[in-house]
Amino acid sequence: MKTALLLIDLQNDYYPGGKFPLWNTEVTTQNIQTAIAKAQAQEMLVVHIQHIADPAAGIAPFFNEGTEGAAIVSAIHDAAPDAPVIVKHYADSFYETELETLLQEHEIEQLLICGMMTQNCVTHTAISKAAEKYQVAILPECTTTINEAIHLIGLHAVSTRMPLLTIEQAFGA
């Protein structure tokens, strides 16, 4: 089964010094780097997904186009420098993006989802109507959000719809 690893919104504004720093970003980033290395070793498609605030909606508090905060954090970009970048303007990574086209071109059947924020862009992408044709799993140790409680609430809510896999379960030992 052809699998893609989706890296959602791993952008500077979510890290210390950014405009909306999240909880547990250092550990989450290290886990995602591990997942990227395992995906690359298995020749999986790795995809960066970058949220850019919609300028038509006015200036957003973060992720404004052309700002350092909107850039993909270097630790993740450097781990997968040749991965395609899909730009989105909504929580659902499929909505009005080229993600579906990219996945079809690569004949992808399974999605492994990492990123930020657990209860928002991660879960909205995972439960997207467009994602229903794929076998979807979230890697909880590769996601984070505002705090641990919201992280766990978001994961629990989506757990009835798809598996939550450890890195080892997703990629093997």
Image (cartoon, helix red, strand yellow):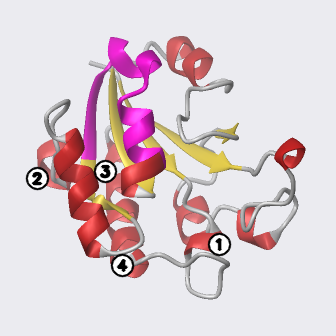
First in sequence, mark 1 or 2: give its number.
Answer: 1
Which residue has dot 1 on it?
13
Name the residue: 63% across, 39% down: 90
Residue flagged by tag 3: what amino acid is it? Lys
What range of the chain is rendered magenta? 121-138
Which residue has dot 4 on it?
24
Cα distance, mark 3 to mark 2?
Answer: 9 Å
Cα distance, mark 1 to mark 2?
Answer: 33 Å
Residue 59: x, y in percent?
85, 60
Regarding residue 155, the answer to whether it shows in the image is yes
Residue flagged by tag 2: what amino acid is it? Ala
* Residue 2 magenta-highlighted: no
Which residue has dot 2 on it?
173
Q: What crowding class fits label 4: few (fewer than 14 Cα within 10 Å), some (14-19), or many (20 or more)?
A: some
Q: Are marks 3 and 2 in contact (CB under 8 Å)?
A: no
Quadrant of the rendering where the N terminus is positioned? top left
Name the residue: 44% across, 35% down: 125
Residue 38, label in figure: 3
